[in-house]
Image (cartoon, helix red, strand yellow):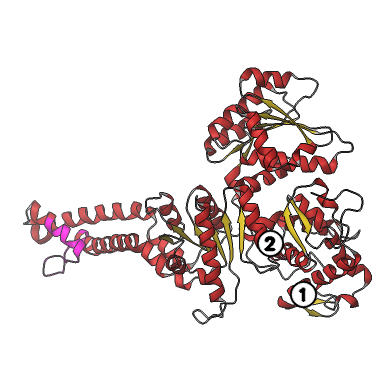
């Protein structure tokens, strides 16, 4: 029953930035546009007061007396007694001046204490996102969360970080402190939060933060807070810079066999490589020859995922041609093969330096012409230079893509040139990677998207196709994510775990008939519990009344409906392989690859 879900949540992807009453009030009171009203009004009040005092009582006042009297008006000192027949000018000034002074004082007070007011309101927040770390990645997450209408609280250890002021101006409280301390997380309302992002530049600190947050969230579910039951699930996502360590950490959580696990890990390079190839895929209609300049983190992922795709789609045994362009190309290739040993079976590597001579020589090779070029280094300025050199040397029909992390001004120039014809396409790594989808789906987002894609393909003829993933309702997305999280539970029940992909045949892993029945029933039970929790009941199908005829045990389902769950179970090995993972049978209870040799 995959793909069905509860009613969509009203908060969509394109919701406007948060507009709570407190945010509108604080923003309105401190809006700089008020200065264009207050300054002229203050000057006008002074001039009118000066004129009024100078002409009051027959005009027998010195200039200093008039100036002194006009200034006193701002402090609620009225005109000289008696206060009748003071004249139009002074009458206007004695009301306008205190209004201007009072409004300016209110703006000053709110501006000074605005940050404190924002923090005082944190205990009243519920279901918000806690962002730990306001570096480049953290700030990008905050920007995306704001655009999607999320409420957030930020924790930053450096009080001099210039991004703090921007976040506070957006209405997001910023707490200065160490997120590895429980008191700091408590002050950010972590017990009532829905998500926590640990995205500092220190992977160890990020791991400590999510471990502590999990402990605090677990205790929150056992005791009410501010009258609430505390039964919500806080999901934590930690940034890990080492891709190998990141895989081990997230698989450790995945293999716990708990679909309510609250901790997940991600690596910017790994996620970026997948998104890069989604946006600029390798053309496999002919034998591809990809050139990868500066084989850093994203580049390694690009080569691995391109190799997996070529293995699945090639018709013969021709290897994928990969030319690595780097001044230390041989060392980079050796390190890549050490990380992914299976690449030796599918790739034919060539090395080239970044010199113009070698790039021209590569472009002029007719026996194995380059079909696509990716520039994936960590340094933006070096990437831009290499991309422009490749664009100059290669044929205009060869796509050239470069990653850019922070030099967005240069990125815009390259994009403008690309729009005019043959140019360099730009992949903005942080903007593409630090997304709301990653916050919600974590490292399993790719599997959730594949689940939805397969669900769309299964729709019978004549039935309107479900919308593509970017246009899907939030509740339907969450249903696919829940199904992806449950994969570890299913596999654990039959003595299997998930491991990093080490063999290209992993997608052909087969379950026994008995396991298919068991896992299919587990998926149906998971789906049924999800529907019941959303208020659906048994009855003839009626979406408006939340009636569904399939809310019955698996053995009471029509055979064609029960087969839907088995189809998704059968596809688990392929979906995991597409995400760079494979299934390992710890019990070795059955032959898993009857048509192939067993994986290493």
Q: Residue at x 49, y 80 (%)?
A: 226
Q: Position of residue 41 (x, y in %)?
A: 29, 55
Residue 356 versus residue 537 in the image, above or below: above
- Tell me whether the residue at label 2 lies in contact with that at label 1, contact meaning CB atoms closer than 8 angstroms: no
Residue 29 or 353: which is nearer the viewer?
Answer: 353
Q: Relative to the observer, which residue lies in front, 445 or 9?
A: 445
Q: Which mark is residue 254?
A: 2
The dot on residue 474 is: none
**Where does the image place residue 499, in percent across and percent down from the top left?**
72, 55
- Residue nearer the viewer, 387 or 64: 387
Q: Residue at point 50% right, 51% down?
A: 202
Task: Say whether residue 152 is visible.
Answer: yes
Could you say where residue 114 lies in the image, as x and y percent from the top left? Answer: 37, 62
Few, some or many residues within 10 Å of mark 1 (<14, 14–19, 20+): few
- View extreme (right): residue: 559
Range of the magenta residues?
68-89
How many angstroms separate mark 2 from mark 1 (CA)? 36 Å
The residue identified by callout 1 is 544
Counting from the top left corner in percent of width and height, residue 583 is at 78, 56
């Amino acid at each position: 029953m995959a793909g069905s879900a509860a009613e969509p949540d009203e908060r969509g992807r394109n919701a406007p930035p948060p507009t709570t009453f407190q945010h509108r009030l604080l923003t309105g009171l401190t809006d700089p546009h008020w200065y264009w009203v207050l300054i002229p009004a203050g000057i006008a009040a002074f001039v009118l007061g000066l004129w009024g005092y100078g002409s009051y009582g027959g005009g027998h006042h010195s200039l200093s007396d008039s100036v002194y009297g006009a200034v006193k008006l701002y402090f609620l000192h009225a005109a000289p007694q008696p206060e009748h027949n003071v004249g139009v000018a002074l009458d206007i000034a004695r009301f306008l001046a205190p209004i201007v002074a009072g409004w300016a004082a209110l703006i000053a007070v709110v501006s000074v204490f605005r940050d404190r007011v924002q923090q005082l309101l944190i205990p009243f927040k519920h279901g918000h996102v806690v962002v730990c770390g306001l570096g480049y990645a953290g700030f990008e997450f905050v920007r995306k969360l704001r655009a999607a209408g999320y409420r957030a609280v930020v924790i930053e250890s450096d009080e001099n970080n210039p991004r703090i002021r921007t976040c506070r101006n957006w209405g997001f409280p910023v707490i200065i402190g160490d997120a590895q301390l429980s008191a700091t997380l408590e002050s950010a309302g972590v017990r009532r939060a829905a998500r926590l992002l640990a995205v500092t530049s220190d992977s160890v600190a990020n791991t400590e933060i999510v471990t502590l947050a999990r402990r605090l969230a677990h205790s929150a579910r056992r005791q009410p807070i501010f009258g609430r039951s505390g039964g919500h699930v806080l999901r934590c996502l930690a940034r890990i810079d080492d891709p190998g360590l990141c895989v081990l950490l997230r698989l450790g959580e995945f293999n716990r066999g708990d679909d309510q696990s609250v901790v997940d890990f991600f690596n910017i390079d790994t996620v970026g490589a997948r998104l890069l190839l989604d946006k600029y895929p390798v053309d496999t209609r002919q034998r591809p020859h990809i050139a990868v300049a500066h084989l850093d983190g994203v580049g390694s992922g690009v080569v691995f995922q391109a190799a997996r795709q070529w293995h699945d789609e090639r018709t013969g045994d021709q290897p994928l041609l990969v030319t690595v362009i780097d001044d230390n190309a041989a060392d980079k290739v050796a390190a890549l093969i050490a990380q992914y040993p299976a690449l030796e079976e599918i790739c034919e590597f060539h090395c080239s330096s970044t010199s113009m001579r070698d790039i021209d020589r590569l472009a002029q090779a007719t026996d194995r012409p380059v079909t696509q070029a990716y520039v994936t280094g960590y340094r933006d300025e070096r990437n831009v230079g290499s991309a422009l050199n490749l664009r100059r040397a290669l044929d205009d029909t060869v796509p050239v893509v470069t990653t850019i992390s922070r030099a967005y001004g240069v990125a815009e120039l390259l994009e403008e040139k690309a729009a005019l014809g043959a140019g360099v396409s730009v992949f903005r790594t942080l903007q593409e990677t630090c997304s709301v989808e990653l916050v919600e789906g974590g490292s399993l987002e790719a599997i959730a998207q594949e689940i939805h894609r397969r669900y769309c393909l299964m729709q019978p003829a004549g039935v309107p196709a479900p919308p593509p993933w970017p246009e899907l309702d939030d509740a339907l997305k969450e249903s696919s994510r829940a199904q992806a999280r449950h994969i570890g539970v299913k596999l654990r029940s039959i003595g299997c775990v998930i491991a990093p992909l080490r063999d290209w045949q992993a997608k052909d892993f087969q379950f026994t008939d008995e396991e298919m029945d068991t896992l299919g029933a587990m998926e149906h039970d998971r789906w049924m519990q999800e529907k019941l929790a959303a208020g659906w009941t048994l009855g003839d199908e009626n979406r408006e009344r939340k009636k569904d005829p399939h809310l019955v045990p698996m053995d009471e389902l029509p055979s064609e409906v029960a087969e839907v769950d088995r189809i998704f179970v059968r596809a688990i090995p392929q979906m995991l392989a597409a995400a760079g993972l494979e299934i390992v049978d710890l019990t070795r209870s059955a032959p898993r690859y009857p048509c192939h040799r067993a994986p290493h």
